Amino acid sequence: MMKTLLFNKYLKLSFLTAFLFIHWNHIQAQDNSWKWQHPFPVGNSHFDVAWISEETFYVSGTKGQFIKTSDFGGSWEVSHLPTEATVREIDFINESKGWAVTDNGQIWVTEDAGTNWTLQYENAESPTLRDIYFYNEQIGYAVGDAGYVENVLFKTENGGEDWSKITLPLTAGASFYGLFFCKAVSQDTVYAAGWDNTFFRSYDGGTTWNTISLPATAGGFYEGAYFVNESTGFIVGPSGYIIKTTDSGATWSVLMGSAESSDYFTEAYFYDNMRGWVSSFECLYTTEDGGATWSSNCESDYGGSRKSFIQFDTEGNGIAVASYDILVTHNGNDFEKVLPIDSINDLYSISNANDHLYIAASAGEIFHSTDKGQQWQVMSTPVNSALHCVQFVDDNHGWAAGNDGIVLKTEDGGNNWQQVEVGYEGNFSDMYLWSREELILTGATGTIIKTSDAGANWSVGNISAEDNLNAVHFVSADTGYVVGNTGLLAMSTDGGYNWELQDPGVLSHLNDVFFVSSSTGYAVGRSGIISYTENGGGLWIPQVSGVSATLNSVYFSDANHGYITTSGNVLATDDGGKNWNIQPTPSGNTLLDIYFNDQGQGWAVGTAGNILFYGEHITGVEDLGRGVTTLETVIYPNPAKSRIHFKLQTSYSGPAVLIVNSLNGNKVVNTNINFQDGEYLWDITPELENGVYVIQLRLAGEVQSSKLIINR
């Protein structure tokens, strides 16, 4: 069963740079599990693509992520392989049947286009499998490395029911080993390439192998390869190296490359012997003459991240994958990002005030939601430094702090932020806010400062420590705790002016502290450490987390129910920490903070813009889809400049109502429109500024909603 259709069971909201395909379902989600709220529809990095047909392609990624589109990125369906591993490569022999390999030695197969996956093979040594290629439905190869010390190759002759390991020779003196490429150009002829600058050939289906040394490079190794046919192939690598063979790998000529080159080529694709592309992090190189000459495109829309996949057709359509970004082109030169649409800046902390949620983020951003995270408004601040903490005491009065000694305050709900001078240029890590006027900040090198007059004056806390302080929590107006590096833990009983060191029983960095009462508290940190006290810190004793990963934050909604974030997962307890269990999440990124309300709804935030929600409510645009049945609408272009095109899936002619809301809920457009043969062109109101809006389309007794991005 498909695990999610975007946001499952209530609302499927798909929007993209080129097209926006809206699909609705009015059944409300009932499962209590962690789900994506941001970015949309997924927030993990991507690795490989299987381009199935003109408009259909599949994409694999971190933590078993598998997404597919049938309209060249206009809408997405999301499913997962049942694995925590990264799915590095996929290979499909038709639209339905394909294989996937992971970075822990697993090989999976699907018979239904990725809806369901079956584990075919798992190697006990957990090698990183980096490529898979099936010559036909029976014969396939998977290659990779085992800690960069072995050339790993597996073969199947029965569609993956059985896999046999084939040993390849190692080149003496190489810095590291492993295979990054494999292709069977016929039933018996197989090619592979490795990081030890070796090209491997087999003419008997992998039983025996010839080895050819590749030309030495300034970078020391190669990383990407593509064979057009049995004789002609290309291999690329760091220092701008491109090499070519026209005799099945027996000899290789250097087309480009030098120690002075800053290009780091990772991928190559050739449509035929003459027309091809190679990609560095920032640039796409194109040749029309088999590599004799090259033209480069280094425009900003191609991005600066490492490319793990490129492919093009004869019409100029192409796909490129670079970590979190999926890029497409329709002319082979100009790229647009189809995923992610949302910001992927790092999110450091989340707080709540009067059912409003606030998130401190990198690049000076503050995220704000008034509807439990279903819509997020990005508050503008006068700084670009990362903000590590934000808290509000009411709807209007809030504070934020972060790197470079930045402290901000607002008195109008975040519409305007004023920078407050505190006489400190280091990085702030956390804050505790008692009232509009009184707050305390912690930071690097033992920094603690406090104000009781809304920032007019600041006092320096007295603590005998120079380690970085990572978190602060107060149980009352007077009693509070800080934690920091190298096991630092201290207590104050006078509102934060003076601090007494305590012994947490560990020397590892502590990242967060939380007290559920004046006596009971928890501190978490590196190596899965949880320290627990029942007497206000007089004695700290360890609890068993069951993991060795770094624990980043801790929050208790009551004396029994607690939550801890780590990399990609949440630990939960319902017995005050006697037992901690892993709650899996769809995220493959580091989760940095967590908050739960008293209705059992929770939010976890982290790197790459990740916001996860736990509990029973929809994810998307709240209540805008109720009562909607199966009417579908295509809206394009999106982002739009001056005009958008509404196209129904029926030939409906008649009246409709178009409503546009800003993300803070203000209605900015409310107008009557008329469809003619299922279509309507709307000239965007000139007064609408660049930004993200929510469109409601009301017609024939139904309501549909979507996001619209205006970018003039």
Image: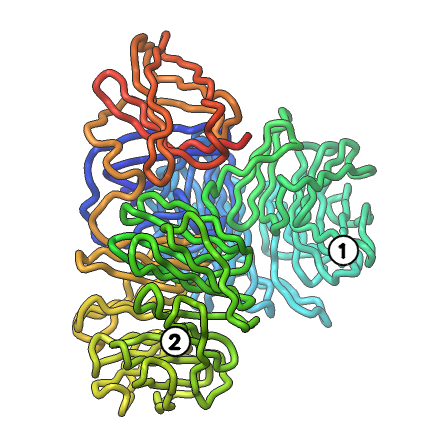
First along the sequence among labels 2 and 1: 1
Quarter-of-image position of residue 383: bottom right
Amino acid type shown at disc 1: Ser
Above or below, 119 relative to 430: above
The residue carrying pointer 1 sits among few (fewer than 14), some (14 to 19) or many (20 or more) residues within 10 Å by Cα, namely: many
Q: In the rendered image, which residue does mark 1 sit on?
A: 239
Q: In the rendered image, which residue does mark 2 sit on?
A: 548
Above or below, 588 relative to 446: above
Quarter-of-image position of residue 481: bottom left
Going by the image, does 548 lie left or right of 129? Answer: left
**The residue tagged with tag 1: helix, strand or loop?**
loop
Answer yes or no: is residue 452 visible: yes
Amino acid type shown at disc 2: Ser
Looking at the rendered image, the quarter that the N terminus falls into is top left
Residue 168 percent across, percent down from the top left: 62, 62
Going by the image, does 194 lie left or right of 676? Answer: right
Q: Residue at the spot x=35%, y=14% of the render? A: 673
